Image: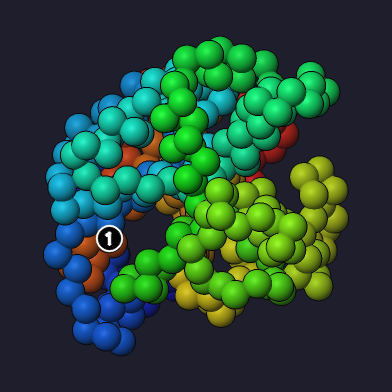
Amino acid sequence: MSRIQNSLGVCVGNYFFCIRLKSLFDKNNVMVKSRLIFIGDVHGCIHELDQLLERLSPGKSDTLVFIGDLIDKGPDSTAVVKRFFELGSICNIKFVLGNHEEKFLRYVNHIETGSGKEKEMKGTEEFPLLYSQLNTEELAGMREAYYSIHFPEADLCAIHGGISHQIAFPFPFDYQYALHNPKNYKGLDLITKTRFLNPEGKFVGLGEEKEADRFWAETYDGRFGKLIFGHQPFLQENPRIFPHAFGIDTACVFGGWLSAMIVENQQIQFLSVRASQAYAQMKGKGLYS
Ligand SMILES: [Mn+2]
């Protein structure tokens, strides 16, 4: 951590954790006038989301990017999804497909095609209520989520989970749930759920990790530029900084913090609000907690 802090120059304010990242912008000498704001995994924590939004006070020149997993585990997933779409009237909004949204949309697709397969899915306890409370426009809006969103001006790409070091499709790029079928882009769907990679750099399923396997961001060499991701909760006040990646899920639903990463005028800032309680129990041992 200290090596990274020294090379980037970190200053700590009351609420802001500021990092000067000249390398993000020096190449093209681009000045960003509006804010690019990334928000970590909300998981139904509407109270903390509203607190964070109040502090951020987004305006029409800002772009707000949710990193995925708006839903499940927390107190009110419906309110979070509705809040996301409401934000579209005051700023630019985008959201990255989380593994929980992918599962929810799969569930909805089964219902709407009449396949009946939704009954065989596990971990769908919250879906009937959510499905009944979202309207057609909101469901259609969820299908516009991205597997990855590239922000070339910031040399930054947003994904939910992680990426293996060997992929069979062009990257970084904007891949969208409604447009890019993983059948045509082998491994695209793994972006939403990748955590560990084996020594060959290939995806390792949850619970199948071996000692030699590594969390993907630890060994990621920056070949696709800087990446920003959620999915892996880090129980700490500010996002986890890796050499070429930022982990912004600071475990809000587990009683941690809800974090935003703000890119503005050659600077990156972090802003976090503390969860008012733990709404769910973290399974197993947290990676870095
Ligand atoms: Mn996730």
What is the x, y in percent for residue 241?
Answer: 46, 60
Q: Looking at the rendering, which quadrant does residue 115 occupy?
A: top right
Q: Looking at the rendering, which quadrant does residue 149 occupy?
A: bottom left
Q: Residue at x 34, y 21 (%)?
A: 47
Q: Residue at x 27, y 60 (%)?
A: 263
What is the x, y in percent for residue 8?
Answer: 33, 73
Residue sitting nearer the eye, 272 or 182: 182
Q: How many numbered badges does the structure rendering display?
A: 1
Q: Residue at x 61, y 24 (%)?
A: 281
Residue 88 vs 244, above or below: the answer is above
| Residue 162 appears left or right of 42 | right
Residue 222 vs 176, above or below: the answer is below
Residue 124 in view of the camera: yes
Residue 243 vs 232, above or below: the answer is below
Type of colouring: rainbow
Residue sitting nearer the eye, 122 or 145: 145
Helix, strand or loop at label 1? It is strand
Quarter of the rendering occupied by the C terminus: top right
Q: Amino acid at mark 1?
A: Val
Residue 2 vs 23, above or below: the answer is above
Return the residue found at the far bottom: 27
Q: State yes or no: Cβ of the residue under disc 1 lies below 8 Å from any atom of ligand 1.
A: no
Return the residue found at the far front: 113
Q: Looking at the rendering, which quadrant does residue 257 occupy?
A: top left
Residue 252 in view of the camera: no
| Residue 259 appears left or right of 76 | left
What is the x, y in percent for residue 233?
Answer: 55, 42
Residue occupied by mark 1: 263
What is the x, y in percent for residue 282?
Answer: 63, 30
| Residue 139 appears left or right of 232 | left
| Residue 194 appears left or right of 264 | right
